Each structure stands twice: as C-alpha cells, then as structure tokens.
Amino acid sequence: MQTVFDEEKKRIRLLKPQAFDPKSIFDCGQCFRFNEIEDGSFEGIAKGKVIRVSKIDDDIVIDNAVKEDYVEIWHEYFDMETDYVGIMESFSARDEVLKSAIEYGNGIRILKQDKWESLVSFIISQNNHIPRIKKCIENLSAMFGCEIKDVPVEFGNDGRKFFAFPSYETLADLTEKDLEPIKLGYRAGYIIDTAKAIAEDGGESFEKSGTLSNKELMEYLLGLKGVGPKVANCIMLFGYGRMDSFPIDVWIRRVMNRLYGIGENDLKEMNRFAEKTFGEYGGIAQQYLFYYIKNLN
DNA sequence: TGTCAGGTCCTCA
DNA sequence: TGAGGACCTGAC
C-alpha cells in the first residue's frame, strides 16, 4: 500500500488500503471518541490528537496529520501491519457464520488504543448505552483533560472544543463528588479507586503491565475496582492489542446462542468454542460477530 | 411508569 | 463456588 503525505495541508492519503472501512471501524463499538459528521467522515480524538478520517473512492484520507504523526501514531493505531485480508479468508474458510459476518462488516480493524483510556472507557461501558458512554467520556475529558488547541477551524463546526483524555494522576486526586456532574453513577467510585490504585506506585506497575503474560495481565486487571471478565477482555483487546482476547457481552451471548446453538449462560463453552474456532485472532472475530448481530436486530 | 442497556460487586447458601 | 439482587442514569 502506498501512502501520500501532503505536509502543507496536513493530509495523509492511504492508497487503496485493504480491509479499511471507517464506518465499520468506528461504529463497531470498540472506541467512543469518534463521531460521524455530515459528509460521512469520522472526526475524533486519540493519543491526544484530533483527526478526521474519510473514505474517498477506495482511498483513506486522514486530515490534520503529518508524516511524523503517521509514522509514530496512526500506522500502529490503525493496526496497519496486521494482514486482515488473510485473517478474514482464513475465518471464512472455516466458519460459515463468521463468513456472513465478515461480508457484512468488511473493513473492521482493531484499533490499538491507549490502555489507560481503554480501562476507564470500558469501566464506564458496563450496564450502559453507547450514546451515554460517549457522553460520559466526553464530559470527563472536558472537565479534567487538557484542551487540544492544534485543530483546524473546519473541525468541530458545531462549536465544540476538543479535549484529551485525563491522566490517572489527575483522576487519582479527585473525589466521587468531583465526578458528580458527569453522571457516571456507581461507576464514579470504580474510576476513582482504579486511578488511585494505579497512581499509588507512580504508575509503575500499570506502565509495566504490557509485558505481562495474558494470564498475569487478566489477573492484574481483575484486581482493579470495577473490572470484571468482560471489561478486562475489552481492555486487553483494545488497550493492549491482545488479539486472542474474546469479550463476551450480551450481544456475543446472543450470537453464540442463536447462531452457534450454545446455551446463553454457558460462558465456559463459549470461551472454549472461541479459542478452538477463532484461535489467536478471537478478538477480530468477536468484533465482526458483534457488529453483525447488533445490526441484524 | 417500567424496562433495558456491550457488567460488577456483594451477600448468602 | 455460583446464583441472584442491587446498583446510577436516561432513552424509549
């Protein structure tokens, strides 16, 4: 794939990348800070930067980004080194359900997101609606994150400003009362507790957690307040890039039950089935199945 | 007004 | 060890 950089316009053009569809990527529920705008592009914040991602013909255009950003951030963020076409072909060859899901959601990629932001975002996501999750994260950033100034005037033409996600140091100094205006409900306590636990040793354990084995990392995350198996799997997949993680939420339960005939409460069998059928890329399969069943309803 | 939403925590048997 | 209720909030 060729990449063209226009440093003056701060525009990057990926020429005909395979398996890259912004709508599938940003609408499949893996990230909460990108929103579709009138022309079908997606505008959002990641890694402290504001970008706009558009599909023009078969190319992908990233606005407000220069070559240095692409090399240091966006190439990894959009997981450009993974062979999604090969993985999809392999999935389609061995599983008919997944084949249909892939045909439906062609172009999903697993975003390599910040692990702290993923941790808090998925704590907020529990027992919650996506629009409300987005609102909570937006409000949390607006109240306690730094404003991002380097944004073109045509961005946020609804008048909104852009804020980076607040650090754990910042949130560790807050109380539940400070978070009341954000309406996080009982999740506010989880977030404060988790931020304090991470900040306790200056963030050292958390920063090193990326080197842990899957089993160790799961245990570490489950030790944080407000993190159960589903949230831990989401964080491992989206924040740590552990592609074999397979988060089982109510939608995946429905898929497993309706399309694979597994008992809706038989989580053990679902995990066993996912490991056997989807293997090292279980997380990618999960995203296709999630997007498929959610839009099938 | 009641139910539900991409769960987790806590209690109790 | 696992089942079941409580939990914030807001859209429908």
Image (cartoon, coloured by chain):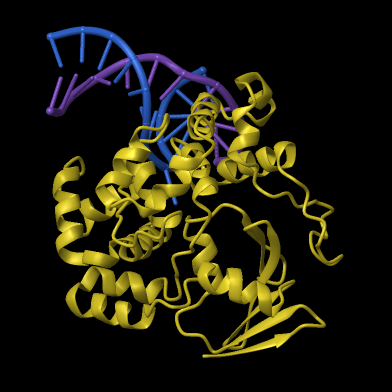
Chain colours: A yellow, B blue, C purple
Q: Position of residue A127 (x, y in %)?
A: 44, 35
User: Where on the picture, by quarter, is residue A71?
Assistant: bottom right
| A121 w.r.t. A297: above or below | above
Q: Is residue A197 above or below residue A283?
A: above
Q: Is residue A260 visible?
A: no
Residue C11 occupies quadrant:
top right
Residue drawn at (49%, 33%) of the image = A201
Give residue A111's position: percent from left, percent from top.
Answer: 49, 64
Q: Position of residue A6 (x, y in %)?
A: 75, 86
Please give left or right for residue A211 compared with residue A274 in the image: right
Q: Nearer the viewer, residue A95 or A195?
A: A195
Q: Position of residue A289 (x, y in %)?
A: 33, 62
Residue A52 sits in quarter: bottom right
Query: Would residue A283 appear left or right of A49 to someone viewing this image?
Result: left
**Above or below, comparing residue A90 to residue A58 in the picture:** above
- Residue A145 in view, yes or no: yes
- Label tally: 0
**Residue at 42% of width from left, 29% of height from top?**
A225
Left or right: where A70 falls relative to A198: right
Would you say A255 lies left or right of C8 here?
left
Q: Residue at x 30, y 48 (%)?
A: A248
Quarter occupied by the C terminus of chain A? bottom left
